[in-house]
Amino acid sequence: MSRYADCMPVIFNLLFHEMYRWRSLEIISDTWMPIRSALQLLNECRTEGSGALRLESIKLKRTNDYLSRFWLFCPRIMKMVEGTMFGALIGATHQDVPAQSSPLPKLRNVALYGVHLDWTNFLRYTLGATPNRSPTVSHSIQSLELSHHSGEVRPTANEFSAILEACPHLQNLVLRVSGPQDGLLRQVSLPLLQQLHYGYSCVGDDVRVLSAFHAPNLIKLCLEGRNLSGTTYSPTQDDGEDDIADSLLKYCATHLPFPKLQELSLYNVNAPVNTFTLLVATIPTLRHLLLHRTPNALPALSPVQKSLAGTSMPCPALKSIQIFPNSHKDNLIVTLNERSKSSSRFVEWQCEEMLEGVVFTLEDMSHRNQIGCGV
């Protein structure tokens, strides 16, 4: 064991005495052994104490995204996560979870980044889901993140569907290089979902996953692609086109799954210009757009000349555009100049440059970057 993993029992033995006061639990490590050691302690049912009944947030993060690219989990000998998921937090008086609909009644936010669980166990003992019974309004997860899981430790289609169905009041969902490989077997209704961050991977049927979400009230959508070059990013070179991105955008353009969409963020989404043209033509409600290494989306925002009907303006409600890297600034100005000829609507824009992990906004503080005029 690593020295950090060896310290976990001592640390938790001190903290467990104050568990009744906990409102959030956050564990971050760049290696698996400390996380696994912490999970072993958190998954041990306790014989005394009231548990973490005030707990609102759980965040477990293993900061090694690279390993999620592989199907096999590493380290292999430590793949299994055993015990009652977060059994130590439930408390001695709440161990019979099937009789309890709210083992952690205040829990609202769960983020599992690079950290997998026994998903069926998590569904039963943490979310308190039982057959033919759903959590009540006051006992429901509102924010859920599953990110960067190796293929063999991701939830199956049935497990993932059941987890979402146990969170009927979910408002924010982050699914980044995780979830079932072959899509979902049935559609999941998420009527209160407002934000979705979907990071697709190089394997699996991502369209079948995205198409299974029934979220008619979604306002913010973020699509995150992968770095196709596999190298450190250079602002003067963009990755090639991505077939998965092309399929996802075409699905959104033809099926219109999010009719109330107002904010769209695209990270490393490299599809043809024609595909972006199809997409933006179907989002008249879009107000804010963020493009991170997604240069082909800019030409799609230019007005489309129609022989009989005149000019058609993509995303007519668009108010702001944010782009990275700064090398795309000239293309943005060209696009906005073309839009200004057909519409008087003002658009605010920002270009960002990144230096040593810090984002700086390149903006004239005395004069806003504006194209056109507002009424």
Image (spheres, rainbow, N blue to C red):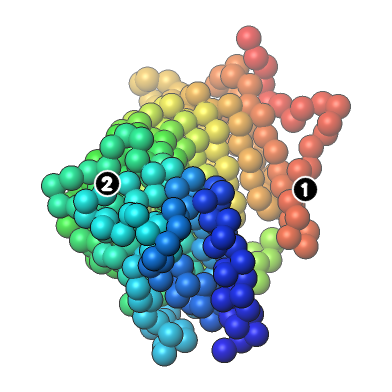
Question: Which quadrant is home to the N terminus?
Answer: bottom right
Label 2 sits on a secondary structure element that is: loop
Sort mark 2 into few (<14), some (14-19) or many (20+) by Cα contacts within 10 Å: many
Q: Position of residue 261 (x, y in %)?
A: 42, 33
x 52%, y 72%: residue: 38
Q: Please indicate whether residue 136 sits to the left or right of residue 333 in the image.
A: left
Q: Please indicate whether residue 141 sits to the left or right of residue 318 in the image.
A: left
Q: Nearer the viewer, residue 192 or 237?
A: 192
The tag on residue 101 is 2
Q: Nearer the viewer, residue 328 or 73?
A: 73
Q: Position of residue 27 (x, y in %)?
A: 57, 64
The tag on residue 360 is 1
**Does residue 98 sit above or below 150 in this rendering?**
above
Does any portion of residue 243 appear in the rendered image?
A: no
C-beta proximity under 8 Å, tags 2 and 1: no
**Does residue 213 sit above or below 205 in this rendering?**
above
Quarter of the rendering containing residue 237: bottom right
Count of numbered badges drawn on the protein = 2
Question: Going by the picture, which residue comes out furthest to the left?
Answer: 132
Q: Position of residue 275 (x, y in %)?
A: 39, 48
Question: Sequence order check: which comes first, mark 2 or mark 1?
Answer: 2
